[in-house]
Amino acid sequence: MIDPVYYSINLSPLAWALTGVSVISALLLIFLWAWRARRVWKQAMRDNEAPMPKDEAFPPVSVIVLARGDSRNLASLLPDILHQDYPAPFEVIVVNNEESTATADVVGSLQTSHTNLYMTYVPQHARNLSRRKLSITLGIKAARHPFVALTEGACRISSPLWLRSMMRHAAMGKELVIGFGTDKDEPDSTQPKQMRGARLRNFDRLWSAVRWVPRAISHRPYRGSSTNLVYSRDLFFRHKGFSSTLNMVYGDDDLFVHEIATRQNCAVELSKNSRIIVPRTLPRYMHGIEKRIRTFTRIQLPSSPWLLMGFCSLLWWLWLGTSIAASIVGWPSLVPLTVVTAAAVPLWTCSCLQWRKAAKALGLRPMLTMVPLMALWHPVYNIRYRIAAHRNRKHNFTNRA
């Protein structure tokens, strides 16, 4: 016979308070944290099923490819762009950032068979400016069509419908279209240490996407993917390009997007056909740079997305701590343990399923049971990057004197 003490509800106020906080934390995480991931995969599903506008509705577009020492990948990327199934006129402009002869050779070999392929250079003496922003500006000034689609020479395009998928929003009157670039860690036999922490990097990318993509879905974007953006030339020039952030090396895909976006002029595109793959042969190094950049530019962006996700991180630790404490303080009664376990099961299940679906929708590596554990570790993971960003903050400015 079971001792009645094990299912007694005559508990101390502290035990009941801890149990209540644990249950409330679990419910909040389900409705705040898992809900944001659900918005991401739901939008991707809608985009995959959405019909295309009529062919005559699509405007002409200039595809600007920022090339920087990636001629080998450029040789496969440019044909994928030039052979896009797009119903309106389009041109491809390669901006040779380093005046690479290899890049010029790749473009030259393709120009003989493609009259809509062009190339321009970034002057070597332009060292006191953001070369990336200068590259984009030169590409936009060279463009002849009313819209520009931005990507990079190191990327991969897996679908012939990429340009059509991105531009369908422009066909419906939008001036800014935010796509997604999926980072892929690629093994490098010469740099084995770079593959360490692949799971954490993958989760961090998913965490970042779940933070910014729902804002873009709500027509309040504060950033986009630098490898997959579309906006009109008129919108760029109306805002005087990057004039408000010329003193900064970065910010072309977050500060600028936040500046030009309104609730009426922007759209997000997450369909499978619209995704661009961004290979990372030095993933640990490149991810560190990306984290430092984002940490620096966020100080000029709305704080609410970070506060919400930070609150969710706090809730995870609060849920774990109060669940353990309630079980200990309530002992020998098993009621607190039973209650917190009953709340933990839907929390764990819902979080894993929703975030797994979001990862698959964005082309990231799916994670199932590891999601809650990664969420608990993520604040600790961020600390070293925040320290590194603070130490290297001078490198974010064009004038480092």
Image: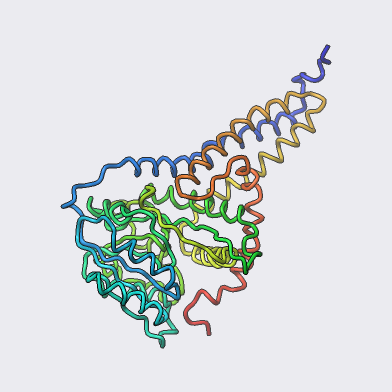
Front-lying residue, 171 or 254: 171
In this rendering, the count of numbered labels is 0
What residue appears at the point 60 percent right and 64 percent down from the top-left corner? 284
* Location of residue 270 in the rendering, given as x and y in whole percent from the top left corner: 38, 49
Above or below, comparing residue 97 to residue 298 in the picture: below
Front-lying residue, 353 or 297: 353
Front-lying residue, 203 or 215: 203
Looking at the picture, the colour scheme in use is rainbow
Say which quadrant the N terminus sits in: top right
* Location of residue 335 in the rendering, given as x and y in whole percent from the top left corner: 73, 23
* Location of residue 224 in the rendering, given as x and y in whole percent from the top left corner: 41, 58
Front-lying residue, 16 or 306: 306
What residue appears at the point 25 percent right and 74 percent down from the top-left corner? 112
Left or right, residue 340 beside residue 279: right
Above or below, comparing residue 145 to residue 88 in the picture: below
- Where on the picture, by quarter, is residue 129? bottom left
* Location of residue 271 in the rendering, given as x and y in whole percent from the top left corner: 37, 47
Above or below, comparing residue 290 to residue 362 in the picture: below
Left or right, residue 33 beside residue 42: right
Residue lying at the far bottom of the rendered structure: 125
- Where on the picture, by quarter, is residue 351? top right
Left or right, residue 80 beside residue 315: left
Left or right, residue 7 beside residue 117: right
Residue lying at the far left of the rendered structure: 56
